Image (cartoon, rainbow, N blue to C red):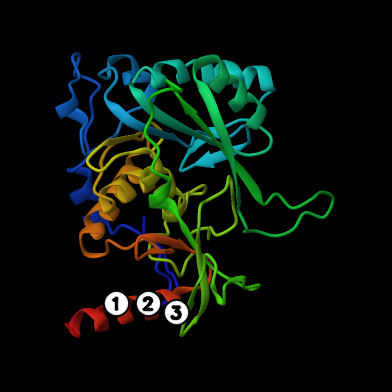
Amino acid sequence: MTKKRAKRNKTITLTPDEYIYFSQKIYNLKEINNIKIEDILNKTINNDLFDIINRLPKQFADLVIIDPPYNLNKEFNGFKFKSSSKNQYLDYLRLWFPQTVSLLKPNGSLYLCGDWKCTSALQQIMEENMTVINRITWQREKGRGALRNWKNAMEDIWFGIKDPKDYYFDVESVKQKRKVIATYRQNGKPKDWEKTEKGNFRLTYPSNFWDDISIPYWSMSENTDHPTQKPEKLIAKLILASCPENGIVFDPFAGSGTTSVVAKKLNRQYVGIEMNKEYCCWTEKRLQLADKEPDIQGYSGGVFWERNTANLQIAEIKKKQTDCTDF
C-alpha cells in the first residue's frame, strides 16, 4: 500500500482507509451467469479474465485495447508471468484472444500491445482473427542502457479491425502540433505552418511511429507503482482515433486503469477487467481524481504536442482565454 516517498513524488497510492473505501466500488462477476451490459458498463471488474470471458455480452465494444503480459519473466503484485517459447506464448494468446474479438461490434477496432520479443506472435494471432491495418511503433524512452545489447526502447501496437469496409477512424482528432525548423513559403506566405509569438508550428497528420510519448514517472500525477503502466497520452491517441464519443472502450487486462481513466476523460464509456484487487482500487482512485483533474499530459487544445512543451501549451491556453475575454 503506502510507503515513504519524497515530498514531490506524485505517485498515486492508497492508505489503508482508501483501500477499504475503493474496494467497495469495484465489482466481481464470478457468481453472475447471465452478464448484461449494465453489469459491466463504466465499472472496474475484479475477476480473472479466464473466469468470465465466455459469459460477457457479445459485440458490445466499439474499441478494445489490450496490454497483456508480454513474453517475459515479470511479477505483477504477487502474480508471476513466466516467459516461454513463441509457440507456447501463441497457445496462451489463443486461450482468450478469439473470445475477446467476439466482444467487438462488427465495425469495431482493436489494438494489441507488445515488445520486440512477442510482436511476431501478436501479429500472427491478429492475422488469425482480424484484418491487420497497421503496426504502430512508439519510443519507450526509459531505463538504463544494456551492456551487451542495444537498449530496448521501442514497443509495438498492432491495429486490427473486423471489417475493412466499415470501421471508425477519426484522424483529425489525433493531429500533432510540431515546431517547424525549416519554414517553407508560397507567394511570401507560410505554407502549411503558422507563425506565433512562441515560434513556428505545423499541424501534422500522425504516422505509425510515435516519438512524443513520456513514460509515467514519479513527478507525473498519473503515475502508479504498476510495473508496465502505459501513458495516458498513448491511450488517448488510440481512443480518439478509434472510438466515437460515448462509445464503449474495453480493456481485458486493465492494470492500474489507464484505459478506463482516459476513456472517462475523453467522454467515452469503459469496461475494465483486472484480476489484482489493489490495481482495481488504484483504478477507482484515478477515476475519482479524473473528475477534478481531467487533463491529459501532452494533449491540449484538441491536438497532441511534442515532449517537453508544457510551457508552450500553457501559453496557448492563456492566449485563448485572453482572446475570449476581449469580446
Mark 2 is on which residue type? Glu
Mark 3 is on which residue type? Asn
Q: Nearer the viewer, mark 3 or mark 1?
A: 1
- At 29% from the left edge and 40% from the top edge, which residue is drawn? 244
Q: Quadrant of the C terminus?
A: bottom left
Percent of width and height locating residue 5: 44, 70
- Distance (Cα) linking label 2 and label 3: 9 Å
Describe the element under mark 1 as helix, strand or loop: helix
- At 68% from the left edge and 38% from the top edge, which residue is drawn? 116
Describe the element under mark 2 as helix, strand or loop: helix
Q: Nearer the viewer, residue 189 or 295?
A: 189
Residue 320's label in the rendered image is 1
Q: Residues within 10 Å of mark 1 (few under 14, many from 20)?
A: few
Q: Quadrant of the N terminus?
A: bottom left
Q: Earlier in the sequence, mark 2 or mark 3?
A: 3
Q: Is residue 183 above or below residue 244?
A: below
Percent of width and height locating residue 84: 66, 25
Image-quadrant location for residue 259: top left
- Distance (Cα) linking label 1 and label 2: 6 Å
Image-quadrant location for residue 249: top left
Report if residue 137 is visible in the image.
Answer: yes
| CB within 8 Å, label 2 to label 3 | no
Query: Which residue appears farthest toward the front when viewing the image?
Result: 187
The residue singled out by tag 2 in the image is 316
44 left or right of 12 in image: left
Residue 40's label in the rendered image is none
Q: Nearer the viewer, residue 50 or 158?
A: 158
Residue 311's label in the rendered image is 3
Describe the element under mark 3 as helix, strand or loop: helix
